Image: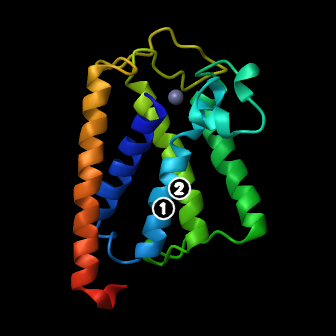
Amino acid sequence: MLTRAHRLTSVAIVEFGLIATNHLFTNPVANFMLLFATAVGASLPDIDEYNSSASRKSIINFSLFLRHRGITHSLIGFLVFAGGLYYLMNKLMPIQFKSFTLLNYWTALWLGLVIGYFLHLIEDSFSHQGVDWLAPFLRSKKKRILLHYKVGGIFEQIITLIAYVSIILMSLYWVWNLIHSPAKI
Ligand SMILES: [Zn+2]
């Protein structure tokens, strides 16, 4: 998937999750942070790709020494990212999970980045190339899931369009609800 497709699909999934669990209206600012961080997190695994938007923004071009869809696209890579980020961020300011509705912005930022990263891997799992979840220990030959799409192909474009439209609709619903029930802000 292209970066834009990853961002839009992941944000749509998380926003839908917030609506489905009735959490969208409880803490608008934290939710906005969560969605924003999801968009950023969803672009991070492709830091191993030479010309990805994550690589272009990074000071070091990691693609020069990382195989594409190697360690950043694996369970270990995900755990190192999530754990390392937790450790670093928690040192600066504590990350707390008292209750989801009381998510502070810092926690929402961490959670969004981690969820975005994870969703990127899930989304890549459905592409032709697939994801080597157990890399570098086991390299599975058959990575493809039954239903798969071609990177940049028509299926990906349709999914991206659906995600785009649903984000707009969900956000309109969100804003409409906030205007009509100001007490919840
Ligand atoms: Zn990827």
Q: Position of residue 43 (x, y in %)?
A: 54, 39
Residue 40 drawn above or below residue 18: above
Please name the residue shown 73% across and 28% down the image.
62
Q: Position of residue 97 (x, y in %)?
A: 55, 70
| Residue type, label 1 | Leu
Dot 1 crowding, Cα within 10 Å, few <14, some 14–19, many 20+:
many
Q: Position of residue 107 (x, y in %)?
A: 58, 67
Q: How many marks?
A: 2
Viewer-side residue, 175 vs 147 = 175
Classify residue 173 as left or right of residue 99: left
Please name the residue shown 48% across and 71% down the image.
30
Q: Is mark 2 within 8 Å of ligand 1?
A: no
Q: Mark number for residue 37?
A: 2
Q: Is mark 1 within 8 Å of ligand 1?
A: no
Numbered disc 1: secondary structure: helix
Q: Which quadrant, please, contains the N terminus?
A: top left
Residue placed under numbered mark 1 in the picture: 34
Viewer-side residue, 144 vs 127 = 127
Q: Which quadrant, please, contains the C terminus?
A: bottom left
Residue 23 location, quadrant: bottom left
Is residue 138 visible in the rendered image? The answer is yes
Please name the residue shown 65% across and 34% down the image.
56
Q: For the residues marked 2 and 1, what is the alpha-carbon distance in whole angstroms?
A: 5 Å
Residue 32 location, quadrant: bottom left
Dot 2 crowding, Cα within 10 Å, few <14, some 14–19, many 20+:
many
Is residue 147 visible in the rendered image? The answer is no
| Residue type, label 2 | Ala
Q: Are marks 2 and 1 in contact (CB under 8 Å)?
A: yes
Residue 24 location, quadrant: bottom left
Q: Position of residue 145 (x, y in %)?
A: 35, 20
